[in-house]
Amino acid sequence: SLAVMRQTGAPVVFDATHSVQLPGGQGASSGGQREFVPVLARAAVAAGVAGLFMETHPDPAKALSDGPNAWPLDQMAELLHTLVEIDRLVKGAGFPEQALMTR
């Protein structure tokens, strides 16, 4: 759980692009479902992670590595704007579950 990891006090970083990777999905190489990167990134930010890792490329189909799960560079600014807004809202409101969690 991201909330449990957050309890450790160490910064939690979520890897949004490798989370959609399908090892061996293209036979001799990995596949991926980049269309799910935004929803997983939004969920992680809403859970209070300290940071995100996302691979990006100007043309993911031509990327030498991890292209199927890379987020298109021309769509990154819009996604980041949304993620920053969610982060501000969530961290400004606090985490009510903290009171119910034991260490």
Image: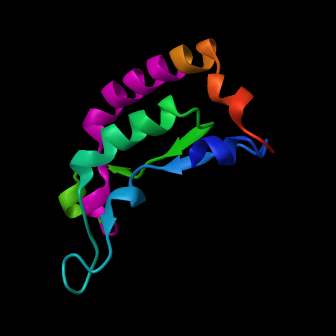
Q: Position of residue 24 (x, y in %)?
A: 27, 80
Up-down relation of residue 66 to residue 81 (above or below): below
Viewer-proximal residue among 4 and 90: 4
The quadrant in which the C terminus is found is top right
Q: Position of residue 39 (x, y in %)?
A: 32, 38
The answer to whether any part of residue 58 appears in the image is no
The magenta stretch is 64-87
Quadrant of the image occupied by residue 83: top left
Up-down relation of residue 29 to residue 48 (above or below): below
Could you tell me which residue is drawn at 32 percent across and 76 percent down? 23
76 drawn magenta = yes
5 drawn magenta = no
Up-down relation of residue 14 to residue 92 (above or below): below
Q: Position of residue 58 (x, y in %)?
A: 27, 47
Quadrant of the image occupied by residue 2: top right
Q: How is the image coloured?
A: rainbow
Tag count? 0
The answer to whether any part of residue 31 appears in the image is yes
Residue at far bottom of view: 28
Could you tell me which residue is drawn at 55 percent across and 16 percent down? 88
Could you tell me which residue is drawn at 57 percent across and 49 percent down? 1
Q: Position of residue 70 (x, y in %)?
A: 31, 54
Magenta stretch, main secondary structure class:
helix
Could you tell me which residue is drawn at 52 percent across and 42 percent down? 52
Viewer-proximal residue among 102 and 74: 102
In the image, taking residue 67 as reference, residue 40 lies left or right, namely right
Viewer-proximal residue among 94 and 53: 94
